[in-house]
Structures are given as C-alpha cells and as structure tokens.
Amino acid sequence: MPGEAAALDGWLHSRRLVLLKTLLTRAERAQLPPAAARALREHWTLLEEAEHHDPVAARGPLGYPAAGNWLAHALAAPDGADFVAALSGLGTLAAAVAVSAGCDFRLVLPAEDGLLSLPGLGSYATAASRVRVAAGDDTVTFTPEDGRPTALPRDVLLHHGSPHGDRWRPLGPLPGGPAVLDDHDPHLARETGRAGLAGLLPATLTAPDEAHEWRELWRRALSLLGDADPERAAEVASLVRAVVPVLWKPDGRASATRLAAPWAVLTTLPRTPEEMAEVLVHEVQHSKLAVLGGVVRLNDESAEAVYRVGWRSDPRPLGAVVQGTYAHLALADLWARLARRASATPAERAAARRRAADYGAQVDHALFLLLGSGQLTREGTEFVEGMRRRYERLSSPGGRTTRNAKTAEPTGSAAHAEGTDNAADRLTNGHFG
C-alpha cells in the first residue's frame, strides 16, 4: 500500500510537471502583453525557487486537485484575453507552493469575485481587485490595494488554522488524513453550466453546522470502513485530498471524480455513513485509474463502439466501462465485507449481501463485455484479467479474499452519472462515471 501510493503520487507529479511545461511553452509562443509576460516569468521563477528550496513540500500544492482544475482550465482557454486571464492562476499556485516550501517572496495577485484563493490552503476575502502577498520568516501578509494588511503565521495557513477575523478563510481539515473540505476552488465554479461538471454545481458552505455535518459523515464513514476493511480505510484516508460539496437536481444524490483533478471527491451530501463510505471507495477507485490513465493506455480510444452496462441507462464507450467496472468491483467487495461485520444486525447483513450481489452481477456482465470487445491493449487485457481474477475470488464461497495489488486491484477514473429513474440507476446511488 505505501509503495503503491508513492507510485501514484510520483506519476501524478510527473504529469503535472509535463502540463505545466506545456502551458509555459504555449505562453512563450503567444504574444502576451508585456505585463502578463513579466508576471509569467516572475511566477515561474518562484515555482523553481520553491522546488529547489524544499522539493518534497513543493509537491503537495502541485498535486492538489484544484491545481489540476486550474491547469485544465488554462490549457483549454482560447488564445487572447481568455488565455492571459487564465495564466494568472500560475501566480496563486506559485504562492501556495512557496508558502508550503518555506520560501520568502512578494507577489501582487488578482482577486476574483471577492476572493484570492490559494489552492490547498484557503481564501482571502477582499473587495479589492489586487492583493499583495508577502511571505517572510514565519509570516504571510495579505495587503489589498488601499487596504489594511492581514498578517498570519505561516503555520496557520499550512495547517488550516482557525479563521482570522473575516478575511482569511481556511479550508476545513477532515480527521484522519490530509483531506480537507474544499468549497473554494474558483476554477471549478467557472465551469460552463451543468455540462462542465456532468450536471453537478459547486456548493458553498455558509453555516458552521454544515461543515460539522460533513466532518461527522467523513469520520463515521472512515470508522465504518475501518471496522469492515482496515486496508481500504487506510487507503481512503491517505489518498483523498479534498471532499468537494456539490449540488445536483433537487434532493438528488450524486458523486464524481474529474480526470484532471484526482483525489478530489465531488459529492452531494450523503444521507448516511454507509452512503458516504460507498462514495469514498467508488471515487478513490476513479482517482487511481485517472492517474494510471496518464501513464498507460488500456484501450483503443479511437474506437466508436459503445456498450450497455448495469450501472448506467445510456450506452458507454469502452474506456468508461473499464472505469466503471473497476469502481463497482470495489463496491461489491465493500458490501460483502460490510455484511460480515460482527456488529451488523441480521437485517443489515441481508441488505449488504443483496448490495454485494447486485454490484457483482453488474461487474460479471461488464467483464464479459470487456474481454470480448477486442479493444483492449495488452496492458488493458492484463488489467481486466486482474479484475476478473479478483471477481472470481470475491464470488467464491465465503468470499474472504486478500488483495493482490498487482493482479486484483488495478486502478479507477472519470466523472460518472446515474439518475434515479430506474432500478439500475438506484443501485449506484447516482455515481457519475
């Protein structure tokens, strides 16, 4: 497990560096206004200095999900004013990296919609359009144009300390790991309507009791996972970096993972710890496959064939079938383990066994489609064969298996969505992917 997590982290870091260099190359070839060109050089230089100063600490903000959302937004921005505006996000990322690495710096950064957001740390509220951010010794100071400075200990920013007056709003830490409750990501909020987030809309938490409810669900879900499957609980606690509250249709329940931002779980508020545990397991699988997908190709992405699967009412391309099969295999395993908990009541055991059987039937059919598709690469065939072996062990009498990371638990990905209009959709609790 630690070795696998380190490999995933390394792959994601390499991918982020490639995308950053791609963005820099595009910016250098563009005819940027002089002020934008100077800012680009200043921000890139600070990134390099921070990486040189403390490469381990610098990796944290670079791998944070919001950094991936900004990169995707900037790379997709059309040439001209939109691209120039998107490049300003490099400054907030550089500031977050430099704060984490312990560097001293001074930058003037734009605030958007009343906030200057530092990915992975929090947001500074201001009515000004620009804010000077200065880090020196153990203090970070925010000074809006024509405004009074706000000085914060660097450790307060890094450890998501209590809010400082009505200006600095930290991300809310979730117990048991590095995860935070993040409703600050400006690039996620900038997605174009419902199409940008598979029908989901970012939600802002405005009352303290809302954040408390999310923290309690997270804590109880991890406790439940720890009781049923300690290894899975440890995986979720160590890999998830952000839980992002979202809205769907009225009273609808849905969750998603963005390929550009693995380790962020986008979800409506689950109703129970069991539902939260299922969401976390499902989306972590998707994040793992999102990272793996940047390293190895599992299927022929040019093929146009689509397939019907048990967890979606619409036909899916093969890549989505791979992703969904991997996530639903984990859910079949999860519910089988929940059924065996010593603390479970007879009714809970029966319900959990039914859920495990439902997910298992969906996986069985999807494996048949995948192995007969003719669209898998050599690596993809090995990956799917690993899932098949895992499913056979899970569905054997007793179903008590241990994980084999090399052959049984490859890795999951992408935004997926099911509604609640039919039985197949209800089985998935509205996961998107």
Image (spheres, rainbow, N blue to C red):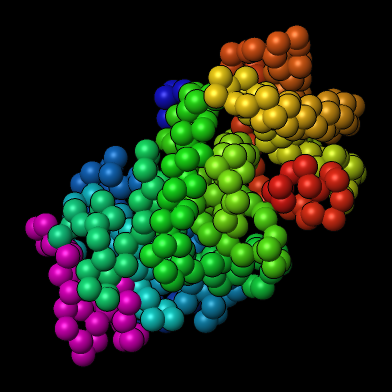
Q: Is residue 206 left or right of residue 337?
A: left
Residue at 24% of width from left, 86% of height from top?
145
Q: Residue at x 28, y 44 (%)?
A: 57
Give yes or no for residue 138 being in the magenta stretch: yes
Instruction: Where is residue 17? Give x, y as percent.
Output: 44, 48
Residue 371 picture quarter: top right
In the image, taking residue 263 as reference, residue 391 lies left or right, namely right
Query: From the viewer's perspective, is 365 left or right of 148?
Result: right
Q: Nearer the viewer, residue 36 or 307?
A: 307
Taking the image as shown, residue 66 lies to the left or right of residue 312, namely left
* Residue furthest out toward the top: 397
- Quadrant of the image occupied by residue 387: top right
Which of these two is toward me, 302 or 127? 127
Q: Which residues are magenta?
A: 124-152
Q: Is residue 273 among the parts visible in the rendering?
A: yes
| x, y percent for residue 249 | 71, 66
Residue at 63% from the left image edge and 13% from the top image edge: 401
Q: Main secondary structure of the magenta part?
A: strand
Q: Position of residue 264 (x, y in %)?
A: 51, 50
